[in-house]
Image (tube, rainbow, N blue to C red):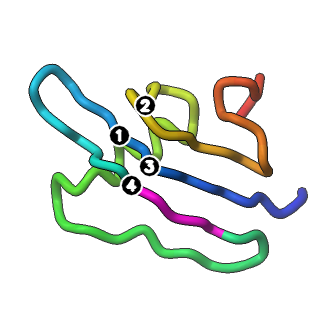
Amino acid sequence: MFPVMIEVSNLSKKYGNVRALDRVSFTAPPGKITGFLGPNGAGKTTTISILLGLSRANTGKALLNGSAIRTIKHV
C-alpha cells in the first residue's frame, strides 16, 4: 500500500437550499496522521462522501495523489 495525498480546495456542496459545505480547503499529506474534527452538521460526512466518489461537489476540487476523484475508477 502506498501513502495517499489528499487535497481539497474550495469544496462546496448544497442539498436543495441547505449548504452542507462552504468553500472547505485542506491538505492531508502522505505519511501523516490527520484528524478530521468538527461539530455535528459541520460537513465531515459530506466531505468524506465526496472523497470516496459517492457524492459530487457543486464547486471546488478534491484530489487524491493529484488526480481528480471523478477520474479514479476505484477510490
Task: Tell which circle, 2 or 3, labels the residue nearer the N-terminal end.
Answer: 3
Q: Measure how far apart labels 3 and 4 are at the Cα level.
A: 5 Å
Q: Point out residue 41 in the picture as x, y percentages from the top left corner.
A: 17, 52
Q: Point out residue 37 in the picture as x, y percentages from the top left corner.
A: 34, 71
Badge 3 marks a residue whose secondary structure is: strand
Disc 1 and disc 4 in contact, CB within 8 angstroms: yes
Specify the amino acid type for callout 2: Ala
Q: Which residues make up the magenta segment?
A: 24-28
Disc 2 and disc 1 in contact, CB within 8 angstroms: yes
Q: Which residue is mark 2?
A: 57
Q: Measure how far apart labels 2 and 3 are at the Cα level.
A: 10 Å
Q: Measure how far apart labels 1 and 3 are at the Cα level.
A: 6 Å
Q: Which residue is mark 4?
A: 24
Disc 3 and disc 4 in contact, CB within 8 angstroms: yes
Badge 1 marks a residue whose secondary structure is: strand
Q: Check residue 12 in the rendering and tell me which mark sits there, or answer none.
A: 1
